[in-house]
Image: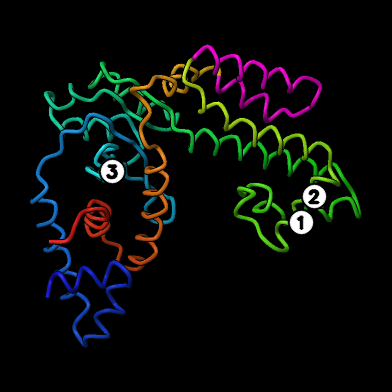
């Protein structure tokens, strides 16, 4: 019964499943939580060598919990903390223990300083790597600022190509079809500055293709030089941020650091789905168990 419960609640809400079986939803929830705790018990205490650090918003973004994943085994191993602070990140390393923290050779994260500070303190031997997903997210935010500035600068009919096109402009071209694809083409043809910013954003992803830091550095210097005379202030600030965090970005050039960072982005999307299905339960422990077992085999 417990296995059937957790299998079905992975693809539906507890309330829907309980209604289908004519059971009290709290009973179904309790059974599923018991099952998930047993899943976690059976896999044992983790001992990761490469970790990914991310956060998940709780209560519509008013607070956060930290999620740490084992990048080699491709599964979440810790969910906790009270916020995004260094003290909350320290809780993970206390959970892991000093001996296992010494085995970590790579910690992938966003450019949030408290995460880096905690990792440097508890696992100083680990290389800190800033994920492509989060770096490109900052660049996307810079592009959106340029879009807003262009909309404010223009008047009348010139605005019509920009209005309502945030998603179109920030999406990967391969994800656009039909009207959205046509609107992007019209927008880029109508606005030279946005066209330049769009092409620069698209090209920046090449930074993670290099296997030597010198080549990556040369690419970045050329990319930054191309901003001259373009009047793209948000991009200039982005380039300054990359300069400040260069060591954590260049770390990906090392062969031993070529981990599957796409897993972290996929987990982030999975967590959003879990949150939507758990909406209304307001139970952080249930959410914690759902996240930690999201990639575990059934028992």
Q: Are marks 2 and 1 in contact (CB under 8 Å)?
A: yes
Q: Is residue 136 above or below residue 219?
A: below
- What residue sits 8% from the left and 51% below the top? 42
- Relative to the observer, which residue lies in front, 268 or 113? 268
Q: Which residue is mark 2?
A: 187
The image quadrant that residue 188 belongs to is top right
Q: Earlier in the sequence, mark 3 or mark 2?
A: 3
As drawn, the residue found furthest toward the right would be 156
The percent coordinates of residue 257 (x first, y second) are 36, 25
Secondary structure beneath label 3: loop
The percent coordinates of residue 58 (x first, y second) are 37, 52
Tag on residue 74?
3
- Relative to the observer, which residue lies in front, 34 or 75? 75
Secondary structure beneath label 2: helix
As drawn, the residue found furthest toward the bottom would be 22
Q: Is residue 252 magenta?
A: no
Tag on residue 145?
none
Q: Earlier in the sequence, mark 3 or mark 1?
A: 3
Residue numbers of the magenta segment: 213-242
- Mark pair 3, 1: CA separation: 38 Å
Q: Quadrant of the N terminus?
A: bottom left
Q: Quadrant of the C terminus?
A: bottom left
- What residue sits 39% from the left and 32% below the top? 109
Q: Is residue 290 left or right of residue 220?
A: left
- What residue sits 13% from the left and 51% below the top? 40
The percent coordinates of residue 190 (x first, y second) are 86, 46
- What residue sits 49% from the left and 20% below the top? 245
Q: Which residue is mark 1?
A: 183
Magenta: main secondary structure equals helix
Q: Residues within 10 Å of mark 3 (few under 14, many from 20)?
A: some
- Mark pair 3, 2: CA separation: 39 Å
């Amino acid at each position: 019964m417990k296995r059937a419960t957790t299998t079905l609640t992975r693809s539906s809400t507890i309330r829907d499943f309980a209604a289908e079986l004519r059971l009290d939803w709290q009973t179904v929830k309790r059974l599923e939580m018991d099952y998930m705790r047993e899943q976690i018990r059976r896999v044992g205490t983790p001992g990761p060598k490469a970790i990914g650090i991310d956060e998940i918003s709780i209560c519509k973004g008013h607070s956060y919990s930290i999620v740490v994943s084992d990048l080699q085994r491709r599964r979440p191993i810790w969910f906790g903390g009270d916020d995004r602070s260094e003290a909350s990140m320290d809780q993970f390393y206390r959970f892991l223990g000093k001996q296992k923290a010494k085995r970590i050779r790579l910690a992938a994260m966003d450019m949030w300083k408290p995460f880096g500070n905690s990792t440097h303190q508890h696992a100083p031997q680990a290389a800190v790597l800033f994920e492509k997903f989060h770096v490109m997210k900052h660049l996307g935010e810079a592009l959106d600022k340029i879009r807003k500035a262009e909309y404010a600068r223009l008047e009348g009919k010139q605005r019509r190509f920009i209005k309502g096109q945030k998603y179109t402009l920030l999406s990967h071209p391969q994800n656009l079809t039909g009207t959205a694809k046509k609107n992007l083409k019209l927008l880029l043809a109508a606005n030279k500055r946005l066209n330049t910013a769009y092409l620069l954003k698209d090209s920046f992803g090449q930074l993670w293709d290099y296997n030597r830091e010198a080549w990556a550095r040369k690419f970045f210097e050329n990319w930054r030089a191309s901003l001259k005379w373009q009047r793209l202030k948000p991009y200039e600030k982005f380039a300054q941020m990359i300069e400040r965090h260069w060591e954590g970005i260049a770390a990906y050039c090392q062969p031993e650091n070529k981990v599957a960072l796409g897993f972290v982005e996929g987990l982030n999307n999975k967590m959003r789905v879990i949150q939507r299905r758990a909406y209304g339960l307001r139970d952080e422990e249930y959410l914690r168990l759902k996240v930690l077992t999201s990639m575990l085999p059934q028992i």
